[in-house]
Amino acid sequence: MALKPRCSLVLVVACCAPEAAWSVEPQAINVYGFDFTPTFALSESYDDNFREVEHDVESTMVTRLAPAFEIKAEDRNSATRVIWEPTRYIYHSASDASNTAQRLRADSIMEFTDRHRLKLEAEARKYERTTSTAVDGINDKIESKRVGGVYTFGARSALNQIDLGASYAQLRYDNADGINDDKERNTSNLTTTWYHRLGSKTRGLLEYDHTRFDYLQSNSPRSSRSDAVLAGAEWDMTAKTTGKLRVGYERKNFDQSGSDDLSNPTWQVDLAWKPRTYSTFTFLARQAMAEGDDGSDAVKATFTQVGWRHGWTERITSVAEVGMGHYVYEGQDRSDDLQDYKLGVIYEMRRWLDVELAYRHRDNDSDADNESFTRNVFQITFDVSL
């Protein structure tokens, strides 16, 4: 099964600056029968190593301006929404790193009958990355497009249910002089999942995942196909406990004989426990193979995260997360151990305004030269809605 490169593999804590989920309650405007919801986030942060490097460290203040616009239409059996998110990043001490990101996403859910449902999604993104870049001091300039869908056969309460999924994605780079050309690829994916009800709140599952990676560079050593089989269960036992567990095995076969085929146990665990309505503990664990980066054929990635979100009063909420990752770069003599910590406090000043203070610490210990780093980010964010 496919995972993204390490800079994205931090999963829920993957963004470059700490951010908590929205606590504000955005209000929609009715526009010719559509629900239109605008929101806006403004953050100011101090980042003491925004390129995540071991030497020649640069620090800067960063301003983030993030409006978002959602338009939604729904009826009894279907719902469709479109989201546009332009985001401006201003690096005050490193103007060459400043950039504007764009994200456009569309989702649709259709329920034809109680036994036939279809989910569709499409996304286009254009953004720049300041970390793990191909050339020191120059942002990676990335364009990605993705379309996908899942057809579900079987009533929600039926003994058995089948999901059939497919997706296609393109990854391109806008850097000059051929920088990152070796990473450009097309990715196609097919997934089949069978669910079998074990109880009123528990279902077992068996999943097969096939992914094809076609790199545009001729005779790329990274072009491959990946196959994974997983078994597990999902449950919603009580209002306090929900979870999903999948464990299996994955094999990656390269097109070129010069790259050794890889195999690896894989798992995905998502658990949530709410001992109180205002307090939630989460546990997340992943192991899978990501596409190669920094000259490697692939990256065997393992990541675990524990989180706690607690409402101390009706207006004050704290968020804490601890993540640990281990990354083995196949085809290179390199392995990394990453620690990622987040702590934030959210103050719901008004129904339409949240203020968040957050701190994030990342520490990467690598046995390769010039790949270790430490990073600290201090941030204040204002989330605004109607």
Image (cartoon, rainbow, N blue to C red):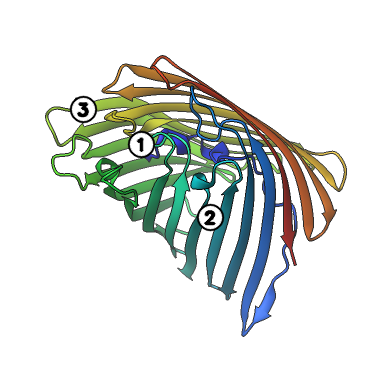
Q: Label 2: which residue?
A: 157
Q: Say whether residue 322 is visible.
A: no
Kindly state the secondary structure of the residue where label 1 is placed: loop
- The disc label shown at residue 261, or none: 3
- The disc label shown at residue 134, or none: 1
Name the outermost residue toward the top. 367
Q: Amino acid at mark 2?
A: Ser
Residue 224 % position (x, y): 21, 38
Q: Tell us which disc is closer to us: 3 or 2.
A: 3
Q: Of callouts 3 and 1, which one flags the residue occurring earlier in the amino acid sequence?
A: 1
Disc 2: CA contacts within 10 A as few (<14), some (14-19) or many (>=20): few
Q: Amino acid at mark 1?
A: Ala
Q: Amino acid at mark 3?
A: Asp
* Gap in angstroms between the C-alphas marked 1 and 2: 50 Å
Q: Tell us which disc is closer to us: 3 or 1.
A: 1
Q: Say whether residue 56 is visible.
A: yes
Quarter that holds the C terminus: bottom right
* Gap in angstroms between the C-alphas marked 3 and 2: 41 Å
Q: Of callouts 3 and 2, which one flags the residue occurring earlier in the amino acid sequence?
A: 2
Residue 88, by quadrant, is: bottom right
Kindly state the secondary structure of the residue where label 3 is placed: loop
Q: Is residue 363 above or below residue 175?
A: above
- The disc label shown at residue 272, or none: none
x 49%, y 59%: residue: 102
Quarter that holds the N terminus: top left
Q: Is residue 226 above or below residue 168?
A: above
